[in-house]
Image (spheres, helix red, strand yellow):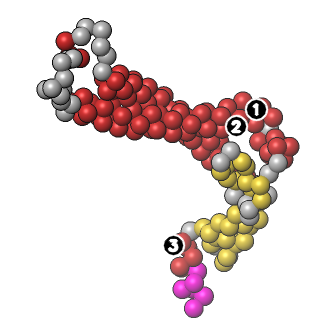
Amino acid sequence: MKKICLTILVFCATITLSFAQEFEISRGKIYLGERQLGESEARLLLGDDVYDNIFIPAVRQKKVGLGLTIAGGACLEFGATTAFCAGAMLAHREIEPSSSYNPRQDPNYQDPNYIVALIGTGLSVAGLALLSVGIPSFVIGRKRLGHLEDATNEQLSSKVTLNLSASPYGLCLRLVY
């Protein structure tokens, strides 16, 4: 029975248990395990240079990107709907045959539906511009925070490990700190 267990363990190679807590960044806040860290604790964990030059700008970039994306989506939706409705009203408008005044023959006349359609088109263009800036900014900020999170987790996980492996004399239990 001991030989079977040893053989299975040799095939499984090494089992490693890590006692490090999981570092996580969520909504611009830093968590270590289940506990949210304050600014002073986060500075101590990350270092002042990393906190000021990587973490804070990445959080700002992600928040600005999210805001621009939401604003761009709203402008695009509202502008496209407005332009479509005004354009449809402009296309299907009929001039009353009994009226002696024909606005289409007056060179100074501006149809309100035409102006609303232009405003809607302008909003749509502004929405596309905001989206084209906001989405990349949000994605880059999120990736920068992800890289910081991965690097910090890798640094924290290498502090304390418990290794269970096979040796020529049996099982080996090694604590690395």
- As shown in the figure, which amino acid type bears the numbered disc 1? Asp
Label at residue 89: none
Given residues 150 and 119, the one toward you in this image is: 119
Q: CA distance from mark 2 to mark 1?
A: 6 Å
Where residue 114 appears, as percent x and y from the top left, is: 30, 23
Q: Residues within 10 Å of mark 3 (few under 14, many from 20)?
A: few
- Residue kind at label 2, given as amino acid type: Phe
Q: State which region is magenta.
A: 1-6
- Residue drawn where x is 31% and y is 16% of the image: 110
- Residue pushed farthest top? 107
In this rendered view, identify the residue nearer to me: 151 or 114.
Answer: 114
Residue under label 1, please give it: 52
- Judge whether 30 appears above or below 14 on screen: above
Characterize the local packing of mark 1: few (<14), some (14-19) or many (20 or more) Cα atoms within 10 angstroms: few
In the image, what residue type sits under mark 3? Answer: Phe
Furthest toward the left, the residue is 97
Magenta segment: does it hold 152? no
Which tag is nearer the camera, tag 3 or tag 2? 2
Q: Which comes sooner in the sequence, label 3 or label 2?
A: 3
Q: Is residue 13 left or right of residue 149?
A: left
Do residues under tags 2 and 1 come within 8 Å of each other at their CB atoms? yes
Q: Which mark is residue 55?
A: 2
The label shown at residue 11 is 3
Question: Which circle's residue, 3 or 1, is located before the other in the chain?
Answer: 3
| Residue 57 position by quadrant | top right
Dot 2 lies on which element?
helix
Quadrant for residue 67, please give it.
top right
